[in-house]
Image: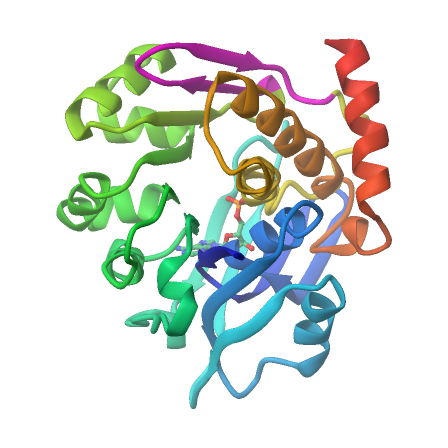
Amino acid sequence: MSLLVVGSVAFDTIETPHGKRERIAGGSCVHFSYSAAYLTPVKMIGVVGKDYPKEFIDLLNERGIDTSGIEHTDGETFFWSGKYEGDMNEAETLETRLNVFGDFRPKVEGEDKDAKFVFLANGHPLTQLSLLEQLNNPTLVIADTMDLWIREFRPDLEKLLNKIDALVLNDGEARLLTGERSMIRAARKLLAAHELKLIIIKKGEHGSLAVTPDFVIATPAYPTEAVIDPTGAGDSFAGGTLGYLSLCGELNQGTLRRAIRYGTVCASFQVEDFSLDRHKGLTRADIERRLIDFEHML
Ligand code: AMP
């Protein structure tokens, strides 16, 4: 059974100290799926407008990703533009045009309703909730979110948090959501408030912290020399992590530790070029090679 993911499928315009790219393939669902697909079959649920090029869909299909759940509707595709400066740990959003993604309510059909591993990638909490409500009995549902939804749609987000198993977010978002400066306190507060199984806080070049009621896993980032564009690093991290968990079929301390290492390796490739460019030519063997390298460092 495929790992099911819903989220944005986008055009991104991105500026970093290494250059500017316009209307390149982006979106939380795309970046997540492209990495998860190294490890497990993936089915994407999303929406695009008439302007979305076939070549972007072809890229996903060539990776073996099932894109039959992407709706093609009248209107324009979601557009995001962002800029990175300095240490590039945080994007400055210049523009978000939700377009067809704005009030998107995904439809889950047939055997997808029985999906066991599910990722609610960054998007409106009501879009995330509406997918979740159509599932029969998922084993593990992990959601991502961002400052826009925390600031402007908090009641919807809180409703979502009460229905999922786990949340991934970055340190700035964790601070915004909980008011806590300590990341371990922020994680524990979220676990308790929403009876969650797992919180993963991403700290950019400082790695990640996974917190459950029973254990904590601290993982450094893979030391990448050339960060060209960090866009999608969080999604790629989540893709590698959940891709491995879905492959194993269960969440425990051992599988999670290894899953996070896969996620870290996927994210390290993601930042080495714009859009999907660095991942395009890679195979599972490249991921495994860097994982071995990483484990030697650890
Ligand atoms: P990340 O860098 O992993 O946090 O995710 C970057 C991706 O998120 C980009 O490719 C954007 O298209 C997408 N994105 C940005 N803002 C939003 C939003 N408000 N909702 C959904 N996706 C978004």
Magenta region: 206-222
Q: Nearer the viewer, residue 20 or 214?
A: 214
Residue at the location (18% across, 39% down)? 162
Q: Nearer the viewer, residue 90 or 272?
A: 272
**Tally of numbered tags:** 0
The answer to whether 16 appears left or right of 103 in the picture is: right
Residue 34 lies in magenta, yes or no?
no
Residue at the location (51% across, 38% down)? 249
Q: Nearer the viewer, residue 285 or 290?
A: 285
Residue at the location (60% across, 37% down)? 244
- On the image, the x and y values in percent for residue 23 come to 63, 69
Residue 272: quarter of image: top right
Is residue 171 visible to us here?
no
Is residue 221 visible to us here?
yes
> What is the image's colouring?
rainbow
- On the image, the x and y values in percent for residue 1 come to 52, 57
The image quadrant where one finds the C terminus is top right
